[in-house]
Amino acid sequence: MSAAINLESAPRPKMQARGLSIYYANKLAVKDLSLDITEKQVLALIGPSGCGKSTFLRALNRMNDLIPAARHTGEVLLDSANIYDRGVDVVELRRRVGMVFQKSNPFPKSIFENVAYGLRIAGMNDRAELAVRVERSLEQSALWDEVKDRLGDSALALSGGQQQRLCIARALAIEPEVVLMDEPASALDPLSTAKIEDLIHELKARYTIVIVTHNMQQAARVSDQTAFFFMGEMVEVGPTAKMFTTPTNRRTEDYVTGKFG
């Protein structure tokens, strides 16, 4: 008799795109994309500039809503519910699906207040509770030991790598379920990049992570799954090791081996 399948431990999709197309005015930026994003794994989106990676990433928490000419067809599901349905609270959606941008963007406030910002917006004002959440978020972003004695200092005095980890802490403070990262290490030196990559490895135990990167080695190092985009289409998606060694599509092979891009 075959062993029963443990459905509790089987990976499940946290988010899903179904027939998703995204337009800027009449320009098609992402074409008929269907993709599952597995819970508590890292999905890397790779492909040449302008291929639709960041547009798709922003669709996952409706950041494209902020672009007047942007529109979409199809669905994006979070825990099987369409995030574009009428009546969806976009503020709550962005709490559940947080984002870290390419360029670190700390506020001109103290380190403490940067991390506490989203919590205060959500109505948390108890100083002791804020302190606990700020410390936990800074620990999760591997920054606590470096800043614990100067939480009142300006965040703008931190190094570039520290500022990016601070922005990750700020995203984690509101306890998201999914973390989107748009080239989070592209402006950083190799040592800071390594810290961000180590951090991503640790965070996937608690969060579902989607990362856009132009760095093939980084995608290979940090992700469980990789999706290759080209000219607005998702060409191929699969386990990262397979995508980088035996991809199915010739265009994927040409890209990951450096023949173009």
Image (cartoon, rainbow, N blue to C red):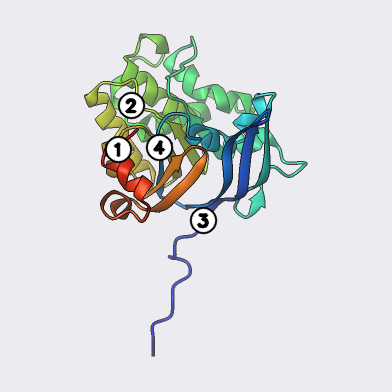
Label 4, secondary structure: give it.
loop
Q: Which residue is mark 4?
A: 47
The Cα atoms of the two marked residues, 4 and 1, are separated by 9 Å
The Cα atoms of the two marked residues, 3 and 4, are separated by 23 Å
Q: Nearer the viewer, residue 154 or 187?
A: 187
Q: Which residue is mark 1?
A: 216
**Point 60% across, 30% down: residue:** 63
Mark 4 / mark 1, whichever is N-terminal: 4
Q: Is residue 55 above or below residue 229?
A: above
Question: Are there few (<14), some (14-19), or many (20+) residues within 10 Å of tag 2?
Answer: many
Q: Amino acid at mark 4?
A: Gly
Q: Amino acid at mark 3?
A: Pro
The Cα atoms of the two marked residues, 3 and 2, are separated by 30 Å
Q: Which residue is mark 3?
A: 13
Disc 2 or disc 1, which is closer to the eye? Answer: 1
**Point 48% across, 9% down: residue:** 108
Q: Answer whether residue 18 is visible to the viewer in this image.
A: yes
Mark 2 / mark 1, whichever is N-terminal: 2
